[in-house]
Image (cartoon, rainbow, N blue to C red):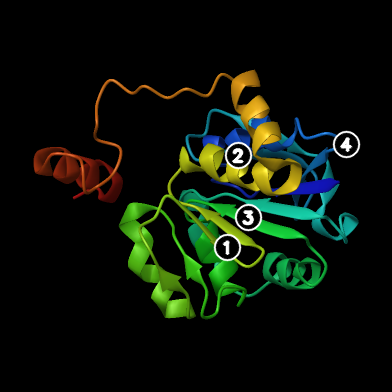
């Protein structure tokens, strides 16, 4: 099974590394990081790079596509090589998965028309502009499209996808292998749960206001 994980400048690391840790352990999986040009691709914090080993066009028939989000997503919304590649490979993929604002790239490429989808909490309503149906669920499955909400939801989405490929027992084995047993010290991981003061502080940090 060929799994293409898309990189672009300004990606959020956990959006792609979380799914990599899960999906890369599937039996027979071949994971390839791809980008418009091969080489090191710098993340949104400017302190981590991941090597894209192949151009987009070098991976013409992946079984699974994964695209993450991050501030760099804003530069990937215009129709161009990435959108054309997504539409091309989507014709033959078994599964197309996104994490965080990666779903906005899929939507802008025309792949989520009239489909349920989610994204980062601050950007949820942006999905409507591209004909998608926003939902605040952590993981959304609509046909072959499997969409995770913000950042850490990529692990949940990848485990959900793994269960569809190798069954629930196989996915649970992967969960145990990576010891994914989240017990956060705070219950502030969604806008609906976080105290209002925390939500406003997060918005100030993210939006600079």
Q: Residue at x 27, y 51 (%)?
A: 207
Distance from the alpha carbon under mark 2 to that under mark 3: 12 Å
Q: Element at badge 2?
A: helix
Q: Residue furthest left?
A: 197
- Looking at the rendered structure, the secondary structure element under dot 4 is loop
Labels 2, 3: front one: 2
Under tag 1, what secondary structure?
A: helix
Which circle's residue, 2 or 3, is located before the other in the chain? 3
Q: Earlier in the sequence, mark 1 or mark 2?
A: 1
* Residue 76 image label: 1
Which residue is found at the position 33% from the left and 23% from the top?
184
- The residue mark sitting in front, 3 or 1, is 3
Query: Residue tagged by mark 4?
Result: 28
Q: CA distance from mark 3 to mark 1?
A: 16 Å
Secondary structure at badge 3 equals strand
Q: Earlier in the sequence, mark 4 or mark 3?
A: 4
Q: Which residue is mark 3?
A: 97
């Amino acid at each position: 099974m060929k799994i293409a994980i898309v990189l672009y400048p300004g990606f959020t690391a956990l959006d792609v590394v979380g799914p990599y840790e899960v999906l890369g352990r599937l039996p027979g999986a071949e994971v390839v990081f791809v980008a418009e040009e091969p080489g090191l691709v710098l993340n949104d914090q400017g302190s981590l790079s991941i090597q894209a080993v192949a151009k987009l066009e070098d991976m013409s028939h992946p079984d699974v596509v994964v695209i993450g989000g991050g501030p760099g997503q804003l530069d990937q919304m215009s129709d161009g090589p990435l959108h054309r590649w997504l539409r091309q490979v989507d014709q033959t993929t078994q599964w197309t998965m996104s994490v965080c604002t990666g779903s906005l790239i899929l939507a802008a490429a025309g792949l989520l028309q009239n489909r349920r989808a989610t994204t980062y909490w601050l950007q949820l309503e942006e999905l409507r502009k591209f004909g998608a149906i926003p939902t605040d669920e952590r993981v959304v499955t609509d046909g072959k499209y499997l969409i995770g909400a913000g950042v850490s939801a990529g692990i949940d989405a990848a485990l959900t996808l793994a269960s569809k490929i190798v069954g629930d027992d196989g996915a649970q084995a992967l969960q145990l292998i990576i010891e994914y047993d989240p017990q956060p010290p705070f219950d502030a991981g969604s806008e609906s749960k976080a105290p209002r003061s925390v939500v406003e502080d997060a918005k100030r940090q993210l939006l600079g206001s």
